[in-house]
Structures are given as C-alpha cells and as structure tokens.
Image (cartoon, coloured by chain):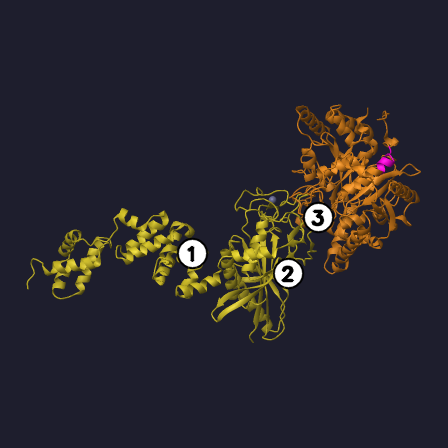
Chain colours: A yellow, B orange
Amino acid sequence: MDYEAVIGLEVHLELKTRSKIFCGCSTAFGMEPNSSCCPVCLGLPGSLPVLNRSALEMAVKAALALNCRVEGRSRFDRKNYFYPDLPKAYQISQYELPVARGGYLEIDLPGGIKRVNIERVHMEEEAGKLLHAGGSIMESDYSLVDYNRAGIPLLEIVTAPNISSGKEARLFLEELRLLLFYCDVSDCRMEEGSLRCDANISLNLPGAAMGNKVEVKNMNSFRAVEYALDYEAQRQAEILSRAGEIVQETRHWDEENRVTVSLRGKEEASDYRYFPEPDLPPLLIEESWVQELKEALPELPAHKRLRFEEQYRLDPKDVAVLTSSPELACFYEEAARHVEDYTGLANWVKGDVLRIHNDSGKAIGEMTPLALAETISLLERGEISRPVAREVLEEALVRGKNPAQVVQDRGLGRIADPGTLGPLIEKVLQENPKAVESYLQGREKALGFLVGKVMAATRGRSDPAAVNTILRDKLQNLPGKVE
Amino acid sequence: MDLFRLSALQLSGLMREGEVSSEEVVNSFLQRIEQVEPQVKAFLLLCPEEALAAAREVDRRRLRGDELNFLAGVPVAVKDNICTRGLRTTCASRILENYVPPYDATVVSAIRRAGLPILGKTNMDEFAMGSSTENSAFFSTRNPWDTRRVPGGSSGGSAAAVAAGEAPLALGSDTGGSVRQPAAFCGVTGLRPTYGRVSRYGLIAFASSLDQVGTHSRDAAGGLALFRLIAGHDPLDATSINTPLEEDVEADNFCENGLKGLRLGLISEQMGDGFAPEVKEKIRQTAALLEGEGAFVEEVSLPLTDYALAAYYLINPAEASSNLGRYDGVRYGLSERISGGGVREMFAHTRGKGFGMEVKRRIILGSYALSAGYYDAYYLQALKVRTLIKKEMEKAFERFDVLFGPSTPTTPFMLGEKVDDPLQMYLSDVCNITDALTGNPSLSIPCGLSPAGMPVGMQLSAPPLNEMLLFRVAAAIENMRPLPPLPEQVNILEGGQC
Ligand SMILES: [Zn+2]
C-alpha cells in the first residue's frame, strides 16, 4: 500500500534588523556574552517593550513576498512558560491575530510547479542562549545564560500541511531562503541558527482521513530536514503496514545515527496560557503603507528566473545559478547590456566570476560588470587570447581596474608583428627539426604542432592567424629545402 | 515654623521667595520622620544623604539664578514598586529584598530632573496586592489618624507618609484603588490619572492593563503640580498617551472658574447597603455644598459596576500571574539553589520562599483563569464585562461631567481585622475598581472626619484626560471647607499654626 505523507513546516527565522525587536540593543553577532542587553531584553522589573518599526517593516515585506494578506489589525500575545533563557518567563509572540495570513510559495518540481500554501506569518522575540557545563541542562552541574540573542526579532512562517516529501520540504526551504534573501530581511543561515525549522508529519492512504501527527525537531540543515522527514515517513509507513499505531508525539532528529528519536517523557505537555500582551497596543497597519512596501519590493526570484529564460534565452539550469543571489543576477544583467552572446556571458559569470569571487573573497556586489563586458569584447576583437582574458578579468574584478589598461600595463596584448614573431618562429623551427621534416613531407598536422609551440613560447599571446602565415612562409623558404 | 506642616505649594512658594532653602525643608521632614516613623512605619528605605544632596544642588542652582521647576526642592516619597537607580526597590517582597535597579523609572527621572529630593521608598502590600499594607513582607504601616488602624493599601506607606507630615508629596501606584483607597483612609488627596497619561516604564508590573502611577498630596494644588510633573508621553511606554496636558493654568488659582453649571452624578450603587452611614453622610453633605456652589447634582445608577469586582479579580490575577513569572532566581533577587536539585527545583524553591500568601493566591487564580479550557469561561468573559462597563461609563459621561461617591465603603478598619478574609479585603476597593477597568482618571479627596475622628474620602471620576477638571472640583471643595490639619495622634512636636 502506498501511503501519502502530509507535511507541514514551521519555520523560524531571525530578521536582520540592527536592533532588537522591543529595545535598542544591537543584534550584532559574536559579541561578549551579555554585553548587548538592557533592562528591557533582560526582563528587569518595570521595563516595557516598544516595537521596533524596522522589524515590523521586514515582517510585512516577507509576508508580501509570500503573497500573504497583511492584516490591518493584529496583536501581540504572551506565551507563558518557565525556562532560564526566557527572561520574562513569557515570550512576546502573536497567537490569535498574526500580522499576515494566507499566502503561498511556489517550488519547481520535476513534474511542474507546486504551490505550498502559507497559513500564517507572525512576529515574536528570540530567547537567550544556554551554555551547559555538561552537554544538556539535565546532565550539567551548572549552565550559563547569554542574553545577547534575547529579543532578536523572529518571523515564524507556518505552512499548510501540503508538502509531500522530504525533498519538497528542502526545496521549499531553499526557495524561501532565496526569497527572503532577495527581500533583504533575513540571512536564513540554518547552520548559524538564523533559520530553524520544525515539521509535522503524518501518513494516510490516498483519500483516507489524516493519520496521527508526529512533530519532528532538531533538524539543523536543509539536508537534515529532507533526511529526517524521509526517515520519519518510512518509519511511520512500516508501523502502519504492520497495522501498528502512530503515537502522536515529538521526535528529535539524531543527525549522527540518522534516525528520529522519541522525546516521550522528557517533555511535559505545555499549556502556554496565551493572552493579549497588555504592554503593547493592538498593531494597526495602514493599507497605504503596505502598498508602499509592496511597490518597493524587488523583483522576486521566481519572476526573475522566468524573465531570464525569456529575455536572455538561457537554459533553466544556468538561470538557477545566475539568480542564486540578487547581486549575481544584477551583475549578469549589467554586463548583458554590453554583450551580445548571452549564453557565453552566462558561462563567464557561472565559471570565472564565481571562481574569482570564491578565491578572492571579493563580494559580487563590489565587482564591476562592465569589466567583464570589456574583457569579453577584447577577446572577441582578438586583442587577447582566452587564457589572457581570464587573467585580465581577475585583475580587473578584484582590483577594480579597466581591462584594456591591465592588458597594456602587463603587456598582454596579441603579438601579430612579424618583426617580433619572426625570430621566435625561426627558433621554434630550429628546435623542432622532426616536425619541420614531417611538414615538408606533406603532413599538415605538423603545422599545428609548430603553431602550438610558438603560442606556448608567448604564453598564448601570439595571434594564431599571424603565426600561421609567417610559419608557412618560413617553411616555404627554408634554406635547405629541396624542390 | 514647622515646615513639615506646610503643603507642597506653600513650601515651593517660600523657596522661590528665598525664605527657606530646600535643605531646610528636607531637614524638617527628616526630623519629622525621625519622630513619627516609629509609630507610622511608612518607609521601607530612607535616604537622607541623597535627599540632602539633591536639596543642596537645587539650592545652588536657585542661587545661580537657574530656571527651576515649580516644585524644585520640594521633597517626595516614592512607593517601593517604582524603580530608583541605586536605591533598593523591593515591592515589599522577600523575592526582591536586595534588588537595586540599574535604572530610574520615567517618573523618577522626571522628579529627579525637576529637583525634587527623594526622601525614601514607602511601604506597600507585596507587589501592590492588598488593601491594607499588611501584605508587606516586612512590616505593617499604621494609619496616622489612629495607629491601631490600617492606612489602606497598597500604597499605604505613601498615603501615611503624607498624612503624618513625613513628606509633602508621594508617588504611589493604583491598579484597582491602591492610591485612592489609602488616600481616603489617611485623609489625603490621591490621584489615579488616566491610563496611559503617566508612563509606567519602571513601575514594577502587577497587572499591566490596570497599573498607573498616581500621586498623594496634602491638597489638590500639590497633587495637580506633581501630576503635571510626571504626566506626558513616554516613548519607552507603548501604552502611554500622546496628548498634551490641558493648557497651562496657574496651579494656585486654577479653581477660579468655579463650579457653575457643572453636572455631577452621584453613583447610587455606592450609597446603598454595605456602605457605612457616617461615610454616606459626609458624601451627602459635600454634595449639598457643591449644589450650593451652583453645580447640578443628580443620582445616577451604574448597574454594571456590580460586576466590576468579579471581572477585576480575573483580569488582575491573570496579568499578575504572567508578570510575576520572571522572579525565578536566575537573574536577580532571591535565588534558592538546592544542592542536587535542578533548574525546576530552583524555580520552585525561589518562588515558594520569596512570595507571600496573597501573591501566591493571585498567581494561582490567574494561572487558572488563563488555562486552556478555562480561558473562554473566565478571562474572556471578564474582558467582555470590562468592555460593557466602559460603555456604561461613557454613556454616563454623556450626562455628567464628573461622577462621584465615597472612595471607600467604610472608614479605616483595624489592623488584622481582614487579613484572613481575602474577599472582605477585596471589597474595601469596591468603589475604586470601575475606573481602574475603564482607565478613567479618578481622584480621592478628603471629605471631613467621621464622628469617631476618622477620615472619609470622596472619589471623583471624569472622562479620560480630564484630570484638571477633577482637581478643579477638589479645589473648590477645599475653598468651601478647609482640610483637616495633621492628625494629632502622631503630633509629637507641638508646632505653631502656620
Ligand atoms: Zn535590550
């Protein structure tokens, strides 16, 4: 029997505001523990939260990018529970009235586009970070708390349960990351904890009622999400096919052993006693402001991909690479304004530009697209060879130089002058008597070998046509030649 | 001349005229405190050095000719749930027994900036939960009119300090009557401003949607001056109102407009059974006085206010249960770490040892009211009642400029009389709850003494942002019938008349 997996995701991501969601403390990463704190984010008696406008703006932008309806009136609630990393013993979150609802995100599947529905998007605050002396809070003699992260703005995105496999979940997360990256609202680095994902998964036979849900947590990479959900689907399928029953529970993904492990007994059922946060007035959002933000949204990845395919007649695989960051896409488009061969340009960007970026660490956004266009133009005009072009490009992009200038400064231009090439070629002929012999006996291939030698002697800079002509001429008029 | 017998404005006038220095004023109050404090026990913390230093600073600035605040140099007492940088702030709780805030509440910054020396921190019911100041974890404050009686609560220390002449002004907080009820019991003037009118930043939260910082003063003019000093929008409090105060009126002659044509509604529910005859009599006498001054007085029924207490005692504990979660022993305050115990044990022991009975009662009540399955039946119902009461009040204010009645059903009760009966204790705030739920400003003013010599308070309520109107009525009443002098019970020093 073939079971269908029904998966819903709950994604938490840190918004990249400069200050925290309810106070002015910096959100910078890697600061001295507890150095970016104040009475508000430490929950000191008497302190009060004030909403950071830029956190709201980023949340609304993300919601709009996810095609959600931004609510004119939403509200913050308190989620009450005790934990040492939670300074007020409640988290300010949005429960009943989230900032946005009802959107979707499309992912590309082999069979076509799939629309993953978004149920809600809401804002909340991050907790502090616990450092346990011995592995876990239960096994440690003591634990330390760093509240620098407490109060970082979080966005929670909840999908409808219409994801069907681990692979789809991973594709969704990748597309989500790209989207929010484009909107410049989150870095979405799962490994650094700026994006976290929990999942609900249940199995049922086609057309049958939903099975019991299992919550899967502790997945620390996109790949882990895929593996964990596939593992969990398989585990549940095996139980069901033995007519067993799925226990409704929370399970942890064990990365090392590649299994999900039950947390039964370790976690009590929680009643968070949600109620409206009295310290913050209802959140009223003006439609006109939403419109403004909507109009200011950048071109989003899906649209950009389609446009690239049409406008530049590129292969979808190339487009996927070129649009993998807004900076790279922008780089390509800028260069394309001065180049005719779009596919060739795509190859340059995918290949050399990314290599140069990786090797040098120079940000794409700081490179000049015109330098690539000019380098290609020098190559096309025959002024430099391809290997030289790559060298010139690197210098031009990393040091911000004009390619023609690089060619001139380094003397990298094509050598076509017979006065320079003549002696070189004569030397090659002297050093390769066998090839000369062979050519004279009528083997044309030997000519190619000799051209190669000349090219090598000039490190690729010789003009092949000129070399050819001079070489033939010299061979015709060899002193010892017998007709 | 005993400076401590003077009102805030009299003191401010003398200082502005160069008759006395702030240092002399502060010294007078410090001496008075030394004499009567053993009987009254209004203060949890005294800070004479800081007060004198602040006074000398004001005196220096005055000599230099600096532009000074109207109240500069007039000392003030501060309730111990309002954060004072560098001064222990305990909420009268073991759990914060040694807590020294690293920052000033916005109201404290305002009074410090204006040059009002802080004499000390006043006693209160633990976390402001109570109506007699007997719930203080440290000691009970006594009513200066009869030290066998309670001063009311929870701001009992502030009210008693002003009544005993230990401070001319005090800051308190009013969640469900905590400024007005003790003001009535102690025969002083106590304002609960419009919700949001005064910043709550730095007021240690009890029930956030109800808490307001309020004032205690000897008279209306002093209360108004202090209110004007602390009121105003605060960007640190998202619930603070961004509406400027009414046009500047000279604080000492603002009552000239009189009461002609003012429509006053006497709340009939507060004149029925359960209200002491001597209290009702004083209210009726005052109503007659007001009518004599040209005001229009009529009884008005607010039937929904009968449900106010029930709604209040769901909303209040619900918010309190959440606000008090942070006292877990992790970051500050009491921390009970049991050897061999884990973090849960630390939470439990810290809270078990650190909180008193009434605090625990409210946390349990509130957690219950917010629990899954009960939320709709209790908390949500209470919010609906609150909305209905608000509407009923709005309607009443279409017909009346001011609503009034007694501030308390009885005169002060005896120490120990109600400690074992929480419901009776809760009922002593019954007149004050409605305005707390609606957020209207409300003022308790002295209304004469009962035949037994105990103060009676009258409570005036106005639509939001109309504090000035309340003070106008209060000042008019003071003009007709002078306030009683300081209670003789604690008049150790025989001072001359001033
Ligand atoms: Zn902070």
**In this picture, is A66 found above or below A133?**
below
Could you tell me the amino acid type at mark 2? Arg
Q: Secondary structure at mark 1?
A: helix
Q: Quadrant of ligand 1?
A: top right
Q: Which residue is mark 2?
A: A264
User: What residue sits right under mark 3 in the picture?
Assistant: B323
Name the quadrant containing residue B63. Answer: top right
Which of discs 2 and 1 lies nearer the camera? The answer is 1
Is residue A465 placed above or below B235 in the rendered structure? Answer: below
Seen from the viewer's position, the closer of residues B16 and B346 is B16
Q: Which residues are magenta?
A: B477-484
Badge 3 amino acid: Asn
Q: Residues within 10 Å of mark 2 (few under 14, many from 20)?
A: few
| Magenta span includes A40 | no
Residue, disc 1: A330
Disc 3 is attached to a residue of which chain? B
Q: Residue flagged by tag 1: what amino acid is it?
A: Cys
Residue B135 can be seen in this image:
no
Camera-side residue of B189 and A261: B189
- Of B5 and A44, nearer the camera is B5
Q: Are marks 3 and 1 on the same chain?
A: no
- Give the foreground label among 3 and 1: 1
Rounded to the nearest whole Å, what is the CA distance between mark 2 and mark 1? 50 Å
Q: Which of the pair A380/A471 is nearer the observer?
A: A380
The x, y position of residue B78, in whole percent, is 74, 36
Q: Residues within 10 Å of mark 3 (few under 14, many from 20)?
A: many
Residue A289, given in percent of the width and then of the height, sits at 58, 55
Could you tell me which residue is drawn at 22 percent across and 56 percent down?
A463
Left or right: residue B414 versus residue B331 is right
